Image (spheres, rainbow, N blue to C red):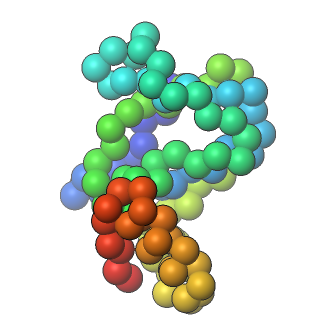
């Protein structure tokens, strides 16, 4: 199982993208036997935590071998500053999905 590592100020360290795997389960922190969602190749997780700078709310576990790409919070901020079109997309995503405005 993978819990998103946190900085000392409880901000998430990484956004994860699933590169290659069978499936990844998102389970409840309170009850790991309860599967809340199943993710597949190309999907991301910890996006809400990264965009809203909040602590994680779930744990993930791979059903089989998994390869992930991880994007640090600092790299995300740098990318959003460097690429205004990516920032616009991330801003709209956060607003539409989490009712949250991001600023970099």
Q: Can residue 74 be seen in this view?
A: yes
Question: Residue 59 location, x and y as percent?
Answer: 42, 30
Q: Is residue 7 visible?
A: no
Query: On screen, 48 above or below 25?
Result: below
18 left or right of 77 in image: right
Give the residue at the far front of this rendering: 96
Q: Which residue is drawn at 68% across and 28% down?
A: 23
**Quick one: 66 or 99, which is closer to the camera?**
99
Quarter assignment of residue 53: bottom left
**Quick one: 58 or 3, which is closer to the camera?**
58
Query: On screen, 104 above or below 38?
Result: below
78 left or right of 64 in image: left
100 left or right of 2 in image: left
64 left or right of 95 in image: right
Query: On screen, 58 above or below 56?
Result: above
Q: Which residue is drawn at 58% across and 78% down?
A: 86
Quarter assignment of residue 63: top right
Q: Which residue is drawn at 33% across and 25% down?
A: 29
Question: Residue 47 location, x and y as percent?
Answer: 47, 54
Give the residue at the far left of this rendering: 9
Question: Residue 93 location, x and y as percent?
Answer: 48, 65
Q: Residue at x 51, y 81 (%)?
A: 88
């Amino acid at each position: 199982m993978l819990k998103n590592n946190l900085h000392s100020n409880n901000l998430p360290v990484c956004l994860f993208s699933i590169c290659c795997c069978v499936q990844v389960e998102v389970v409840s922190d309170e009850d790991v036997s309860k599967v809340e969602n199943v993710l597949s190749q190309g999907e991301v997780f910890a996006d809400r935590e990264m965009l809203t700078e909040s602590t994680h709310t779930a744990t993930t576990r791979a059903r089989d071998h998994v390869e992930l790409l991880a994007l640090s919070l600092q790299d995300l901020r740098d990318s959003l500053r460097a690429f205004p079109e990516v920032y616009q997309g991330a801003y709209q995503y956060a607003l539409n999905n989490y009712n949250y405005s991001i600023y970099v």
